[in-house]
Amino acid sequence: MKSIKSYAAESAEQPLAPFALDRREPGADDVEIKILFCGVCHSDIHTARNEWGATMYPVVPGHEIVGTVTRAGENVSKFKVGDTVGVGCFVDSCGHCESCKDDQEQYCENGHTQTYNAYEQDKKTITYGGYSSHIVVTQDFVLSVSDKLPLEKVAPLLCAGITTYSPLRHWGVKEGHKLAVVGLGGLGHMAVKLASSMGAEVTMLSRSPKKEKDAAELGADHFKLTTDKDTMKELAGTFDFIIDTVSAEHDYDEYLALLKTNGVMVLLGVPPVPATVSPAGLIFGRRSLVGSLVGGIKETQEMLDYCAAHNITSDVEIININQINEAYERTLAGDVHYRFVIDMATL
Ligand code: NAP
Ligand code: ZN
């Protein structure tokens, strides 16, 4: 065991604060990573504040990790000391179920191991995330990161990037498709960049008029205010796809009505409240309401390589670790442009 520095929430009510964390020594298949940057996902906030009701305290959030390999176990063949690597939303899975064999470890039928607030595959050791100086991860769940792009802007690709890339690929989004993104935050801004890079005509649906200029710079072809009832009426039946990234309670029927016949609305945001959906809104127009969870390791590597090839990164605001609580408040207020990333050298 090695004691390292981290930031943890000790309860739903307490702000995050310095915490001494024990990490395992790297085993034969493990890679030890010195963390350089860690993005701040809204899931970190949901978890730190126990909004999903399953937080095990103390919790060290963070699943958008980029760093350098500092040690590698004797069986490690994919990485060597000094390599630049990434870790995303999960760090292990059973490896033998149908989903794992199909490179969809995020849907592991025996339960994948999330990067924090989860159990390792031993089903008893709790995981701690990237708001920390180092992390130890089995090599098969470590990603290769190109040094071509600025690393602080790459970190958010490990969650916001893959979470939006995966459904765009799964549903075959391409030129000729009209696609709307709901909510311009961390996931939303990556959805705009990626969908537009794949050739879709992208409409940003936002409740924040001040984000219109940014949406255009990110690559959105149109910007529509969801608070304007007339606009929402005009948009009825317009889109082939809607990517919903909203983190708080909202009316799904209002957006389903904007789909064309056979249109698909992909839920990515996980508001901590149950939703109601009108069956008629789906039946008339044979619309689909679907979900999607991050992406498998193989696809995450494909996404990182795609972003390196297409020069796609996240728009970030770098913070010191002691600004994390303020960053949470600003994210909740929708004041994020468009991902906070912690410079781990400040830990
Ligand atoms: P974020 O940066 O806070 O962005 C969320 C955006 O949603 C906001 O910027 C805002 O955009 C909009 N929004 C917030 N509250 C709203 C409300 N009450 N009504 C309407 N719109 C509202 O969050 P994020 O990091 O992108 O994460 C978004 C959600 O995805 C979270 O619930 C997170 O837990 C979830 N998530 C899911 C996965 C997955 O695998 N499915 C992975 C990562 C995260 P506007 O100001 O433009 O309206
Ligand atoms: Zn995330």
Image (cartoon, rainbow, N blue to C red):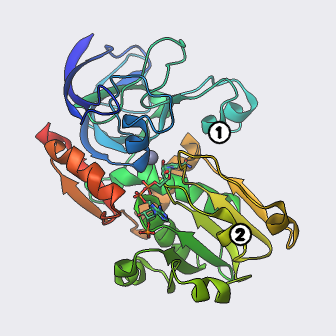
Question: Disc 2 vs disc 1: which is toward the camera?
Answer: 2
Please give the residue where the numbered disc 2 appears in the rendered image.
Answer: 256
Please give the residue where the numbered disc 1 appears in the rendered image.
Answer: 103
Q: Is residue 151 visible?
A: no
> Counting other residues with Cα less than 10 Å from the Cα at mark 1, is it few (<14), some (14-19), or many (20 or more)?
some
> Counting other residues with Cα less than 10 Å from the Cα at mark 2, is it few (<14), some (14-19), or many (20 or more)?
many
Could you tell me the amino acid type at mark 1? Asp
Q: Is residue 155 left or right of residue 114?
A: left
Task: Give the tally of numbered discs.
Answer: 2
Could you tell me the amino acid type at mark 2? Leu
Q: Is residue 58 left or right of residue 51?
A: left
Identify the residue at horizontal 17%, vertical 47% (top origin).
Answer: 323
Identify the residue at horizontal 37%, vertical 43% (top origin).
Answer: 45
Front-most of 74 and 228? 228
Front-most of 198 and 248? 248
Of helix, strand and loop, which one carries label 1?
A: loop
On-image quarter of the C terminus: top left
Q: Position of residue 239 (x, y in %)?
A: 69, 78
